[in-house]
Amino acid sequence: MTGKRPTIDDVARLSGVARVTVSRVLNGGQNVRDEVRARVMRAVEQLDYKVNPQARGLAGGASRLLAFVFASDPESDPNSYYEAALELGALRACLALGYQMLVQNVPDRMPDCHKRILELITTQRCEGLILAPPYSDDMTLIEAVLVQGCKVVTVSPGGGSRGRFDGVGVDDEAGGYDVAVELLSLGHSRFGFLAGIEDHLSADLRLRGFQRALAERGLGQAEYVVLRGDFTFRSGTHLAARLLDHPLRPTALVCANDDMAAGALSAAHARGLTIPRDLSITGFDDAPVAAIVWPPLTTVHQPVKALGQRAVELLVARLNGTNIAPAPVFHQLDHALVRRQTTAPN
């Protein structure tokens, strides 16, 4: 024993076959007799030979591996629907286009979060990255990825990255505006707004649209209270309880996503309120929970699975150089107000 790691040539010598035959066996190729395949696998086991995935990728050219990067901490409560739906849409597109996808959760509060994301390019040989919020607004990170020669597509960018880099999303500002117009038409004039985390810029656009609609009706900051949550059911419950104890209790709660709206609905039920007679509540996303809670939730539908799918399609088009403009592209998908049973005239 020399202490050196065994090579594919060592496997070929021990099994008495050509190097190309060993490669065919290890890659699951056809046209190999069962007896020969068995000899090769015995040699692999005897030598404790390990396939080098990076070498295999280099031998075959491009890795055909993409990474979808989320900022959520696996140990905290996730926005379960949003991330799962994005992932599902992206996986379906990868399957159709012959790519693989690595899903990576990298909490954005970690001091080395940029380093960990960039390592996906060097250690995993990812050809392209899809960045979910708030990474989709992190221009320093995006530019560092591009310097590495890796393609990037952003999901729901809400700041300076929109229009500067490839992206997909909906018109969040218009969605927030539509919700406010609906509630104003029902006669509401005192509002609570449960916003998302501070650096989630696309969700902040929903607040901006809400504020624009109120301003057009002559209503200002005296008519609404904004509290920030983290998109979870738990934060919706906690923040709604605070607003329901406010001296000027709102007649309508507007929530930045459906999970927080479901939490707000739970807090209202705990206080014995009848929804929507005593309080109107709206969400955003049209997650499955919106149709399951009681009463069913009025919300804004955004096609989250389609966003994940479109992100992969755009990224692969960049990688292949097919049917894509040289300038950055933003694919805006349609949203729609879904009226259910948590809103009523005040």
Image: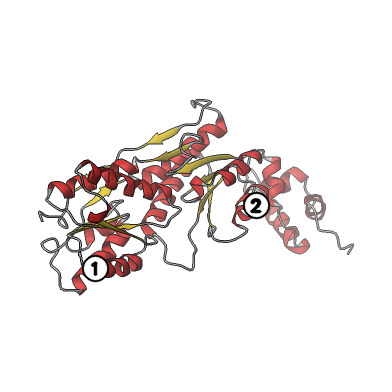
- Residue 30 appears anywhere in the view: no
Residue 242 placement (x, y as % from top left): 28, 69
Task: Indicate left or right for 10 with 156 as reference.
Answer: right
Task: Indicate left or right for 294 with 46 as reference.
Answer: left
Residue of label 2: 119
Residue 301 placement (x, y as % from top left): 28, 47
SS at mark 1 in the image: loop
Q: Quadrant of the C terminus?
A: bottom left
Where 292 falls versus 200 (above or below)?
below
Residue 148 placement (x, y as % from top left): 66, 41
- Residue 202 appears anywhere in the view: yes
Tell me, for residue 246, which label it has, or none.
1
All told, the count of numbered labels is: 2
Between 18 and 302, the one nearer to me in the picture: 302
**CA neighbours of label 2 inside 10 A, class few (<14), some (14 to 19), many (20+):** some
Q: Amino acid at mark 1?
A: His
Coloring basis for residues: secondary structure
Mark 1 or mark 2: whose residue is earlier in sequence: 2
Pointers 1 and 2 in contact (C-beta within 8 Å): no
